[in-house]
Image (cartoon, grey):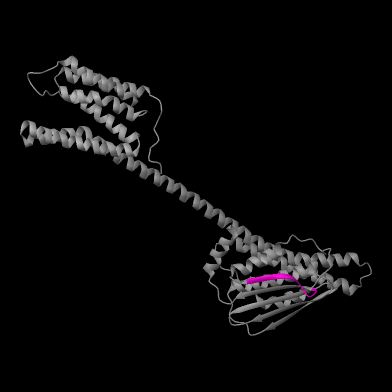
Amino acid sequence: MSSKLPDPRRLVTRTDLLIAVAALAGGTLMIAVGGFATWSKQWDPGAWWRMVPLVGQCAAIPFRRTAPRTALLAATPFNAADVIIGPNFASMMIYGDLLYAAALYGRRRTAERLLAVTSAATALVLGSVALWLHSFSAAVIAAAVAAVTWAFPVMTAMAVREHRFTAQAERQRAEQMARLAELDRRSAVDAERARMARELHDVVANHLSAVALHSSAILKVPDLDRAGVERAMEVIRENSVQGLAEMRRMIGLLRSEEAADPPGAPRLDELERLVGRSARSDLTAALEVEGERPELPAAVELAAYRIVQESLTNALKHGGPGRARVRLRYTRQRVLIDVRSPLGDDAPRLPGAGAGLIGMRERAAMLDGSFDAGPEDGSWRVRAELPVAVDRDDIHRDGMDRESA
């Protein structure tokens, strides 16, 4: 934070001039009514000489904000002359205001130095009056007047500076908190959008890929027998119905205020049916399950189901003829997923955007699992490991962090 407060304005205003004129008029009135002190009855310079320090200090008032140190330095000799002649009440108030302005609008170091100088001057007045008049009470009164005139305005300005700095820091902190809250809100929105995109992709891609493949088979094979047409239409109908059911489930989830997964979310019990539907005329799929399935959290079951579903979808869209094998193995700590499908030719059977692999990797990462996919021994292999026990709050936080990164 800067040690110098920004000046309210850098030009002398009409208000500054009016304050100077008002101070001059008030000071003149105080001199006219005798509002000043004299050090000796034998020596009185007269009212006109007292006007000189007053005019000199009033001339510095218009520059108290724009050039506070210069105005104070210019007024200090006139204040010293006023003290020597005999303190004028108006001149004391004017010089105190100039000290206040120099401490408030100038640098922090200037305020600290002014406090030291005015405190020393007050102590000097106390000692001088005590030695001169041999009166402790008179010395205390003189020191109090000097403190009110010189030291207290500087102390008040320093207190105001600290309050301003504190208020400025609080404003900056509030702005930073507002920006952080906005960033958190945007991160949450982005994370939710990414989650919705994964779900929509997994739901739509699998069923629509099967529909597109079987409808293409019907159109491309003109001499397809009645039984083949019926089998293809059954697959199309089943995938259409399942796709609509999952779309309804997702719409219900989006409309619901509850964060828990709805009862209609796909489970691993439905894998056999999923694998049975994932077939082409030249491609079949088989499921192998090893181990006893433990009690799995809904998030793990959903992620495992979606990974298998997307792997089979990719096999239908891009795989070559042959047999796809889905292997699911349960242990006490992990769920291991291994999907192998034959590699196809260079030209994909259906277009893809690569979002499936990204979605599978994100699902595994959010559960603190692992994921790997790529060609291996003439086939495309997808491997994923998911932990059996997960913390739902950790899933939510980790998901938001990964999506916002």
Q: Nearer the viewer, residue 390 or 272?
A: 390
Q: Is residue 189 above or below residue 370?
A: above
> What is the residue that sits farthest to the bottom in this orientation?
291
- 138 lies left or right of 300: left
What is the chief secondary structure element of the magenta stretch? strand
Q: Position of residue 181 (x, y in %)?
A: 49, 53
* Res 33 quadrant in image: top left
- Name the image quarter holding the C terminus: bottom right
Asked where in the image residue 220 lies, by quadrant, the reply is: bottom right
The relative height of residue 25 versus residue 135 in the rendered view (above or below) is: above
**Whether residue 259 can be seen here:** no
Q: Quadrant of the N terminus?
A: top left
Q: Residue at x 48, y 49 (%)?
A: 178
Residue numbers of the magenta segment? 370-378
- List x then y, in percent, for residue 186: 56, 53
Q: In screen coordinates, is 219 left or right of 297?
A: right
